Amino acid sequence: MKSYRVLTVRQPWAHMIIEGTKPVENRSWSTSYRGLILIHAAQARDEDLICQHGLEPGWLDYGAIIGSVELADIVDEHPSPYFTGPCGWVLKKPRRLHPVPIQGKLSLWETKLPALRHRR
């Protein structure tokens, strides 16, 4: 089992991060950590917001780790229309994973998991 850092994000944002359309995640706090983090799709959902982005709520995963990204930097401004600050977590190299059901947590949390299986 390997230890991973995980960030829980609500849908549709978690899906958009893993699809590569949302390169920055807004947080009110920073971290000194840089490197691989897993993206956990929260159980809570905003169906109106999901539909506004052209997605069907039933297409998305909830309550599961759905992918991985590299936390490359934390900035206070970013050209992405998704940046609202105050801290923009710049995310690179998104990769989809086969969903791993697990309960989410606040902040940047850690979990131990067996080898991850990326989707193509």
Image (cartoon, helix red, strand yellow):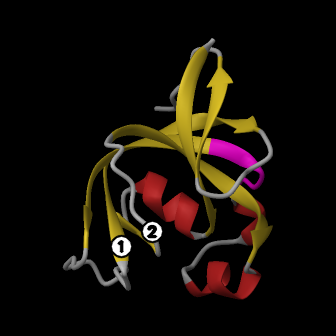
Element type where label 2 sits in the image: loop
Q: Mark 2 near mark 1, Cβ–Cβ under 8 Å?
A: yes
Q: Is residue 42 above or below residue 119?
A: below
Q: Residue at x 64, y 15 (%)?
A: 114
Q: Quadrant of the N terminus?
A: top right
> Which residue extends farthest top?
1
- Residue 20 relative to residue 58: left or right: left
Q: Residue at x 37, y 81 (%)?
A: 86
Q: Position of residue 44 (x, y in %)?
A: 79, 68
Magenta range is 61-65
Counting the numbered discs, the total is 2
**Disc 2 or 1, which lies upstream in sequence?**
2
Q: Is residue 50 above or below residue 94?
A: below
Binning the other alpha carbons within 10 Å of mark 2 as few (below 14), some (14 to 19) or many (20 upward) gives few
Q: Which amino acid does the dot numbered 2 rest on? A: Trp
Q: Position of residue 6 (x, y in %)?
A: 56, 43
Instruction: Check if residue 24 falls in the magenta segment.
Output: no
Q: Residue at x 33, y 49 (%)?
A: 32
Looking at the rendering, which quadrant does residue 3 occupy? top right
Binning the other alpha carbons within 10 Å of mark 1 as few (below 14), some (14 to 19) or many (20 upward) gives many
Element type where label 1 sits in the image: strand
Q: Is residue 118 above or below residue 109?
A: above
Looking at the rendering, which quadrant does residue 111 occupy? top right
Pointer 2 residue:
29
Q: Which mark is residue 99?
A: none
Pointer 1 residue:
87
**For the residues marked 2 and 1, what is the alpha-carbon distance in whole angstroms?**
6 Å
Q: Position of residue 77 (x, y in %)?
A: 22, 79
Res 77 seen here: yes
Q: Position of residue 107 (x, y in %)?
A: 59, 56
Q: Residue at x 65, y 21 (%)?
A: 113
